[in-house]
Image (cartoon, helix red, strand yellow):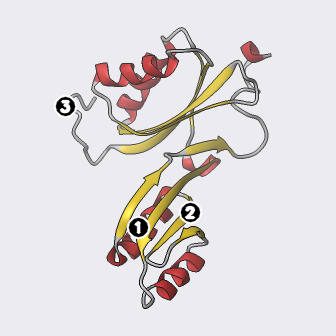
Amino acid sequence: MNTDKTVTSQDEKFVLGVLVANQYGVLMRVSSLFARRGFNIDSLTVGETENHEYSRITITATGDAAVREQIIKQLAKLHDVVKIDTMPPESTVIRELMLIKLRATSVTRSEIIDAVNVFRCKVVDFTPDELCIEITGQSSKIDAFIDFVAPYGIIEMCRTGVVAVSRGSGSLIGETSECD
């Protein structure tokens, strides 16, 4: 196991879907577990599920198979954790949202709008000197958009973190007998 927490060639990003009781303090206990064990969270999103008694935490982290298994084992020990799913990219719909505000002059505005169209983004606000753009997609698409528009001048940006659902029928909450 990679105990020094440095990234190695065997490390890869992985996504976990964690169904938890929708209770005060659960998120703190989950994030504290990562901090105590020295694991880094690359992305974390949380929201109530279709059943208001449960929340879904989507965690993206980096590590080898041993690190992933250790995280799963530690999460499973938490009282409020109902279910944990490893969400492999080939069988999961994974998306992220970003809002990005860019400098836009009369000269560069049309170039930025062209990029917005190519990347299938949406302009959600504008001023004579700025454009605010919404983009949704895989993290790699968002990274590529950032790289493309960076020369125009990024004023600010905010990323939501990854959300994920398994492809096909079934759901994290629907596969759990404790949720009925």
Where disc 3 sits, the SS reads loop
Gap between marks 3 and 1 measured at Cα:
31 Å
First along the sequence among labels 2 and 3: 3
Q: Is residue 153 above or below residue 167?
A: below
Q: Is residue 144 visible?
A: no
Tags 3 and 1 in contact by the CB under 8 Å rule? no
173 sits left or right of 6 in the view: right
Residue at screen point 45% across, 88% down: 106
Q: Residue at x 77, y 35 (%)?
A: 170
What residue lies at 33% left-to-right and 77% top-to-bottom? 151
Which mark is first along the chain, 2 or 1? 2
Residue at which label 2 appears: 134
Judge depth for marks 3 and 1 and give the one in front.
1
Query: Looking at the image, which is closer to me, 177 or 151?
Result: 151
Figure check: 136 above or below 118: above
Q: Nearer the viewer, mark 2 or mark 3?
A: 2
Q: Is residue 176 above or below residue 119?
A: above
Helix, strand or loop at mark 1: helix
Give the amino acid type for the residue marked by disc 1 in the picture: Ile
The label number, if any, that marks residue 4 in the structure image: 3
For the residue pair 23 and 167, the one nearer the viewer reads as 23
Cβ atoms at labels 2 and 3 below 8 Å apart: no
Distance between the Cα atoms at labels 1 and 2? 12 Å
Q: Provide the residue designation for mark 1.
A: 146
Classify mark 1: residues with Cα within 10 Å, few (<14), some (14-19) or many (20+).
some
Q: Can you give x and y, in whole percent of width and height, for residue 3 in the image?
A: 22, 28
